[in-house]
Structures are given as C-alpha cells and as structure tokens.
Amino acid sequence: MYPLALNIDQRLCVVVGGGRVAERKVWGILAAGGRVRLISPTATPGLIELADRQAIAWTCKPYTRADLDGACLVFAATNSAAVQRAVHRDARAAGLLVNVADAPELCDFQVPATIRRGDLTISVATGGKSPAVAAMVKQRLDRFLGEEYGWLTALAALLREQILAAEPDSERTRELFGQLLHDDIVDWLRDRQWDDLRLHVERVLGRPVAFDPESLTKEKP
C-alpha cells in the first residue's frame, strides 16, 4: 500500500450501505471535510439524524450505477455480496477509487485507524490484514499522544510562517526547527508553562516572536 494523505475537503464521497460500518465510513469522511452521498434503502439512527440535519445527502433506495456520478471516492459497505461486487465493478469502470468493506483484495485504498489532534493526524494501517491490530496500536498511541501534540502542530505552523519570512533558506529553516522541537516543548505545552515556552522560542530564534500561547489551546469553531 502507498501511504497518502488525501485532501477531500468539500469533495463528494459516495457511501453505499446504511449499517454500522457505513456509519463509521461517513463519520470519517465528515471529519476530513468531505461531502457524503449515502445510498441505501435503510439507515442507522445515527445516519438518519445526520440526514435530517442535512450533514449528509441520503438517497433512500437500492444502489444503481448512476449513484457514483461526481464522486471522488466510493465506499461499498453493504451486507450484500452482489451489491458489493456491483459497486466495485462500476467504480473501477468509471476510474474511481473504491473501498469495499471486509474485502481488502477488492480495495484500491484502505481506511486506517486514525487519531486526530487538531491538524495533526496519525494513521495506522495493516494493508487490510488485521484491523484488530491497527485498532490496538491506535489505542496505545491514543493514550500516549495528548492534546498538546495538536497545540504543538499549531505552534509550529505559526512559527514556520515567521521563520520563512525571515529565513528563506530551507537548510537554515530545518536547523531552527531541529532546535525548537525537543521533548521539553511538549511538556511545556501540556503543563501550560507559557513563560518557559516563549523564552525557549525566542532564545532559538534570537528575537521576540509574535504569538499568543493560550490561543493554541482554543478549539476551532
């Protein structure tokens, strides 16, 4: 498998199926900013609620080939082997990437177990060989990686803009970030030791920096 972070913001993804597996696929798409077209005669209460809130577009009917029109990704998550094969066949014929639940041999891509900390995304995949192993590793990482890693990502993005404006040389940029990012900075963020954090950043950069440390911890609207 080729690991890839795909931007699906505001792009259409088609999910065929209305059960719990389909619901998990839908939530993953929405978390990445994608648009969902759900195709299924029935749906879980959670999917129905999403449709009622117009968070997804649910077409309450059996699958047909035309349901894939305009899609960038296709997910087959039904309990019918015949429908799964039809979705796979039609997606391949249309040149669309397709994920077929519980059939890794038919998948163009796998959906990894994912942890999100702000803009930081950590994914664990096993090539479809063992979702249980991926889930176990995710759980272990989830306990270890706190919200401070999302704050660190936001801080690094902010500092990167300022560093690139003053130091366009990429080698010098890598050197500065090598000095900025060490284990203590994660502890300072976790414990909200803003004075230590600012002192460290300004010492490395050799100048005052413009950022509000507490703003890093605020949730995005």
Image (tube, grey):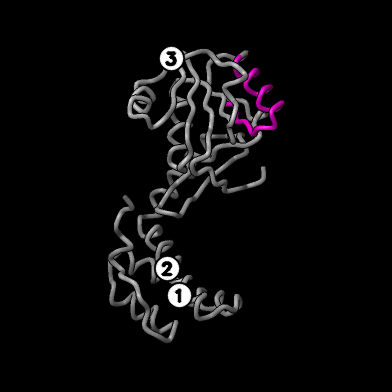
Question: Which x, y percent locates residue 217?
Answer: 30, 60
Q: Amino acid at mark 2?
A: Leu
Residue visible at 55% across and 37% down?
111
Contact flag, marks 2 and 1 (Cβ < 8 Å): yes
* Residue designated by label 1: 162
Q: Residues within 10 Å of mark 1 (few under 14, many from 20)?
A: some
Among the 4 quarters of the image, the one containing residue 127: top right
Q: CA distance from mark 2 to mark 3?
A: 46 Å
* Residue designated by label 2: 158
* Residue designated by label 3: 42
Numbered disc 2: secondary structure: helix
Question: Which x, y percent locates residue 34?
Answer: 48, 39
Numbered disc 3: secondary structure: loop
Q: Which residues are magenta?
A: 83-100
Residue 190 among magenta residues:
no
Q: CA distance from mark 3 to mark 1?
A: 52 Å
Residue visible at 45% across and 54% down?
120
Q: Amino acid at mark 1?
A: Gln
Numbered disc 1: secondary structure: helix
Of the pair 70 and 60, the residue shown nearer to us = 70
Among the 4 quarters of the image, the one containing residue 196: bottom left
Of the pair 68 and 116, the residue shown nearer to us = 68
